[in-house]
Image: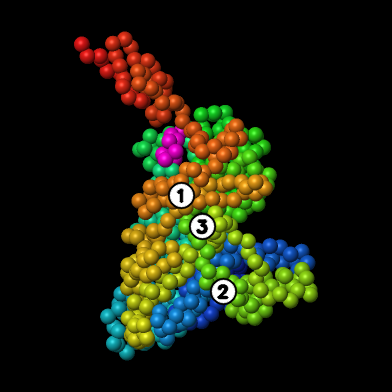
Amino acid sequence: TNNTNSLEATYHLRDTLAFGQHVYHSDRSQSSYNYPNATGDFKIGVVIPIDKMYDPLADTYFPVYNDRMKSALAVLYAIDMVNQNKELLPSITLGYEMRNYCNNTRVALVQTFDLVKDLSFTRCEEKYFKNLANSRYSHNATQESNTLVAIIGTERSKDSIAVATLIGDYNIPVISYFASSHILSDTIRFKTFFRTIPSDKNQAKALINLVRYFNWNYVALISVGDSYGDALAISFSAIAAETGICIPIHRSISTFDSDNQIGQIVQEIAENNKIGVILLITSIDEAGLFIDEMQRQNVTGRTIVGSDAWVVEKFLLTESGNIRNLKGIIGITFFANYVDGFERYLSSINLCQNKNNPWLQEYQQLRNLKNPNFTDCKLPPYPPTRINSSNIDESSAMYIIDAVYSVAYSLHQLLNCTNQYCPQIDFPYFPRTKFLQILKNIKFPGLTANPFKFDSNGDGVGNYYIVNMQRDSTGRHFLREVGIVDQNLQIVADTSKIRWNHDNDNYMSDNPPISRCSEDCLPGTYRHYVEAGNCCWDCKPCPDNYYSNMTNSPLCHACPL
């Protein structure tokens, strides 16, 4: 898909509710047992993708314990931490209601609408009643049990665009922990959308600075054709044009015909031996196919620069068939350290006594089906991705926890809470407009930043690692942190740590690969451009009685008489 707009999201919802009425009603006919939930004074809705696998013995699908399940559990952990904190929202309890949208935009819209459809207010009512706090219609907010105050989700940018379009007129904040498309920074279209990660505009600038840092000016740009890939590629291309970086091959991979397209793209790159660097802005699916195809076509000596969506995926670290093309990959990724408290929380979960979470109950049922004598009630150890000797968390736990705490601290301020109690505040309807204003300006000690705050577009201000794929003496791949992107989006790297993918297999060489159309022109010559974009030129000698005294001189000067 190309850039999704508000009209597309409206059509999504209309078609979903019209064509999929049976899906909606069948979901509502099920009991609340079918999704994790807990009551509280205020409720956080969670719309999150949970992966499921088919079990032929039971002839049904069961949840999988992976990074996405860990993301869901990170929400529960954060809510538990808030509820246990005697100084944050004292005497107030946060509840939650989770929905699985199966990584499908249409399902995300249905599940989100189901969360908000029972809200009886309209924006007109809110405006009409806002000055009637002392009227006979008023009642205590803390008595309005389980009031939905925010929605956390979704994961992908295209899903967040659709959901944020739907929710905007409800004045309910939607806080994503992973959707990074810069389209979502439009506060007019997405007036209640927030995220705890930076916009891809930051990533585009960081990638540009990474390319310039290594003196590359002639790179291939391959993106996935969705709101993440297209938007980030467009931002990169626009900045590249302003900074003298040429993109001789720029291709967008359709999610519907990726295999055939990738084969053609790799062949095209192979035929241009001046392209030493390939920027891959895709998901892990397209990245894996692309690396496989490079291996199949025996394309070597090219360096892949990866975007945040795939460069730290475990899949790459366990792929043994792509050794030649994996080593030397360099990319940027969000700062995402392990949260020790969350890891202890995971180890404390008792799957045999978990009444509020049917997803974990179903997961345990699958384990019992596979082994009737199975008695372990603990979650299995989940192998982490490591950068250097540190574990990083692919479940985005830090960003999810900060999302929950942004809601909690905003409620704390809205209710005029002290460290000991929250006064009872009378209002006929939850003051959503006021709550949004507080959320926009909230500051608190976060995990991803201290203080954590949203910028003027509702975006988080996070940090990036620069990582490099390397191979140890046993042939195993691992990621090594080789630098950071500072707050000004400038590169701070230790180039001595980087291992490149050179064509001569000199893996230990410290010299970065070359990705330039033309070599530098020495003094005594000048550049004669042969292609548009000022990246390809011939070095012409200065004519008699003319000179140049600088590298890459654009012209020769007449000798003085």
Three-letter amino acid code at the position of disc 1: Gly
Q: Quadrant of the C terminus?
A: top left
**Pointer 1 residue:** 483
Considering only vertical position in the picture, is 424 above or below 451? Answer: below
> Going from the N terminus, do you reach mark 3 or mark 1 first?
3
Instruction: Looking at the picture, tell me which residue is in the foreground, 304 or 156.
Output: 304
- Name the residue furthest bottom: 136
Q: Residue sitting at 51 percent across and 67 percent down?
A: 339
Q: Are marks 3 and 1 in contact (CB under 8 Å)?
A: no
Distance of label 3 from label 1 (alpha carbons): 27 Å
| Residue 124 sits inside the magenta stretch | no
SS under mark 2: helix
Residue position for label 2? 345
The image quarter containing residue 359 is bottom right
Mark 1 and mark 2: Cα distance apart in space: 31 Å
Residue highlighted by disc 3: 156
Label 3, residues with CA under 10 Å away: few <14, some 14-19, many ≥20:
many
- Residue 431 visible in the current orientation: yes
| Residue 98 position in % (x across, y down) | 54, 72
- Say which amino acid is labelled 3: Arg
The front one of 94 and 16 is 94
Q: Please, what is the dominant secondary structure of the magenta stretch?
A: loop
Q: Which mark is residue 354?
A: none
The residue under label 2 is which amino acid type? Tyr
Instruction: Residue 522 in the image: state x and y as whole percent.
Output: 38, 22
Q: Earlier in the sequence, mark 1 or mark 2?
A: 2
How far apart in space, not on screen, are marks 3 and 2 (Cα)?
26 Å
Q: Residues within 10 Å of mark 1 (few under 14, many from 20)?
A: some
